[in-house]
Image (cartoon, helix red, strand yellow):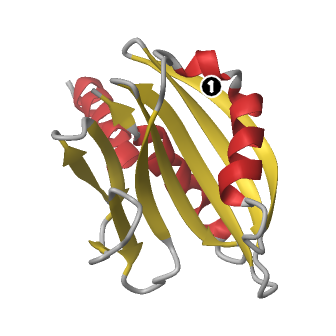
Amino acid sequence: MLAAVLTVSLGLTGCVTRTAGLLPYNDPRDGYSFLYPNGWQPVQGAKGPDVVLHDIIEPSENVSVVIGNLESVKDLTELGGASDVGLRLQSKVIAAPGSGRTAELLNADRRDLEGKTYYLLEYAIALSSGSRRHDLVSVGTSRGKLYTLSVSTSEGRWPKVRDLFYRVANSFSLS
């Protein structure tokens, strides 16, 4: 009996820790959801992204979702592999000419969930001010749109929040 209780208890603990400290964000109108850290608040009046949430203690840490239209693309893989898409985002969005930023694609992975493909991209970013940031970007397509969830922090905080941010980025899903 004790073994059964311990087994169930340990099993439930494993389930709880995957989302411990995270809250769900659901946007049924635009068809996406993700988990974000407890204590993060919406940023009012953010222009461009569909949603931005930031840490109230470390306000430069944030998660955002941007939605763009795609022409004649039904599946993310039609845009290329994870590295191809990551390099394209790097040169056209993250470190676009004239932005004052440089970026390095550190990692590019693919995951498949419920019939949809997602790319998880990791970047080291240098700003014109000299500060450095670390971003994780989860990319997916649905209903003729390109969705990008980006979670960002300073390079100095990255080692402390790495696992948490990976959980956030990997929780991103499209309906």
Find residue 17 and report its horizontal and vertical position in percent.
37, 47
- Quickly name the residue at label 1: 110
Q: Quick one: 2 or 129, which is closer to the camera?
A: 129
Q: Quadrant of the N terminus?
A: top left
Q: Residue at x 57, y 53 (%)?
A: 163
Residue 158 to residue 89: above or below: below
Q: Residues within 10 Å of mark 1 (few under 14, many from 20)?
A: some
Q: Residue furthest top?
A: 115
Q: Quick one: 166 or 108, which is closer to the camera?
A: 108
**143 with respect to 134 (left or right):** left
Q: Residue at x 43, y 51 (%)?
A: 66
Q: Residue at x 48, y 17 (%)?
A: 72
The count of marks equals 1
Q: Residue at x 77, y 50 (%)?
A: 91
Q: Quadrant of the C terminus?
A: top left
Image quadrant of residue 33? top left
Q: Quick one: 66 or 58, which is closer to the camera?
A: 66
Q: Amino acid at mark 1?
A: Arg
Find residue 126 and report its horizontal and vertical position in percent.
79, 72
Find residue 27 and report its horizontal and vertical position in percent.
21, 45
Find residue 169 and report its horizontal and vertical position in percent.
49, 46
Q: Residue furthest left?
A: 29
Image quadrant of residue 82? top right
**50 with respect to 64 (left or right):** left
Residue 135 to residue 80: above or below: below
Secondary structure at numbered mark 1: strand
**96 with respect to 174 (left or right):** right
